[in-house]
Image (cartoon, rainbow, N blue to C red):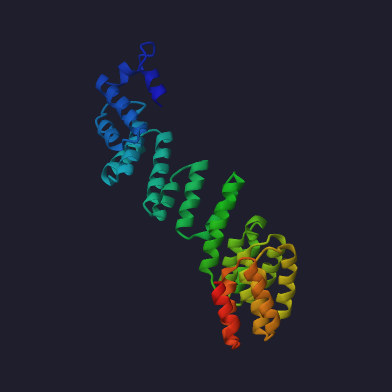
């Protein structure tokens, strides 16, 4: 922008002499320099002095609005945006876009969406601002509808993930709808441990998500999913079989023998319970040490309980 400004001021073009007063040229240059140095108060003090009309006036108004937004001066921001909207279509379009950005930044997604509706023809930036505003407004259905407009797959997956979390949270205990939402997600998002956990948490009947948990753990081992599976599963024998299978591929993981020990304890199989809690402790799980103390105390074996306390 500074290069363009200096080009306008060259004698060979003669543009500045016809359109701007010399004082305005100085104010514009100083304002631009202050803006790029992030000295927004100084930038405003220069931009506000520019009175002469000209091709750069709309751009100066946009920069003035942005500077005012940076220092929290809503009155000047509104004035500069109003000036920018009176210029040509290109400047007006960017003024509406800036207004949407500012509204979103101050937590007013509805105003941001309203400002974006005034823009004819979408740009990459306007699409991103719109989706961010829709997320802020918790309008997850509209986010899903607009996802195909996002060109970058990384960005598209990020926004889909955020919309999925909102959708799952807003529809807790509506198991049929939750299943529909989950199945509609892309493969990458369905396999995200955070999304799976949010889905299970939202279900009224947690067991409906058991198969999804098992499949997810089989394909990509995750300790949070293991814990969730342990809490959800009600079939001890099946749980032990799955934990044993995962233990084979994750022999150094201390959580799996810990959970097996808890299941054996609940089944009254004390020898196996002690064996696996001890194995978990030996693999470095401090929680297993505390559990062993409790286990021995509840069984009346105070000698072993004291030994565990001494080891702690």
Query: Which of 261 and 78 lies nearest the eye of the viewer?
Result: 261
Query: Which of 296 and 309 lies nearest the eye of the viewer?
Result: 309
The residue depicted at 28 percent of the width and 35 percent of the height is 44
- The image shows residue 75, relative to residue 108, as above or below, that is above
- Give left or right: position of 27 versus 59: left
- The image shows residue 81, relative to residue 52, as above or below, that is below
Residue 199 appearing in the image: yes
Res. 119 image quadrant: top left
Q: Quadrant of the C terminus?
A: bottom right
The residue depicted at 59 percent of the width and 66 percent of the height is 197
Res. 271 image quadrant: bottom right
Res. 251 image quadrant: bottom right
- Give left or right: position of 96 versus 188: left
Q: Residue furthest top?
A: 12
Residue 234 appearing in the image: no
On the image, the x and y values in percent for residue 184 come to: 64, 61
Report the label total. 0
On the image, the x and y values in percent for residue 131 come to: 50, 51
The residue depicted at 67 percent of the width and 80 percent of the height is 273
The residue depicted at 75 percent of the width and 74 percent of the height is 241
- The image shows residue 105, relative to residue 250, as above or below, that is above
Q: Quadrant of the N terminus?
A: top left
On the image, the x and y values in percent for residue 39 come to: 31, 35
């Amino acid at each position: 922008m500074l290069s363009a400004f200096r080009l306008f001021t060259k004698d060979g073009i003669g543009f500045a002499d016809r359109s701007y007063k010399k004082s305005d040229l100085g104010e514009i240059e100083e304002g631009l320099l202050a803006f790029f140095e992030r000295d927004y108060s100084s930038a405003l003090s220069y931009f506000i002095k520019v009175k002469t009309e000209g091709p750069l006036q709309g751009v100066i108004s946009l920069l003035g609005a942005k500077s005012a937004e940076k220092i929290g001066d809503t009155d000047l921001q509104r004035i500069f945006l109003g000036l920018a909207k009176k210029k040509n279509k290109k400047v007006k379009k960017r003024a509406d876009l800036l207004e949407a950005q500012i509204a979103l930044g101050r937590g007013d997604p509805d105003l941001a969406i309203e400002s974006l509706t005034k823009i004819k023809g979408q740009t990459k930036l306007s699409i991103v601002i719109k989706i961010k505003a829709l997320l802020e407004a918790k309008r997850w259905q509209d986010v899903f509808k607009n996802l195909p407009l996002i060109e970058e797959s990384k960005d598209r997956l990020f926004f889909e993930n955020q919309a999925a979390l909102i959708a799952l949270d807003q529809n807790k205990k509506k198991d049929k709808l939750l299943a529909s939402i989950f199945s509609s997600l892309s493969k990458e998002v369905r396999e995200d441990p955070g999304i799976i956990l949010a889905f299970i948490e939202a279900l009224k009947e947690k067991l409906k998500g058991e198969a999804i948990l098992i499949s997810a753990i089989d394909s990509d081992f995750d300790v949070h999913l293991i814990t969730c599976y342990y809490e959800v599963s009600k079939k001890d024998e099946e749980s032990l079989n799955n934990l044993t299978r995962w233990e084979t591929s994750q022999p150094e993981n201390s959580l799996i023998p810990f959970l097996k020990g808890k299941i054996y304890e609940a089944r009254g199989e004390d020898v196996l319970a002690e064996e696996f809690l001890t194995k978990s402790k030996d693999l470095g799980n401090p929680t297993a040490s505390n559990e062993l103390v409790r286990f021995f105390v509840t069984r009346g074996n105070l000698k072993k309980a004291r030994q565990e306390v001494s080891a702690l």
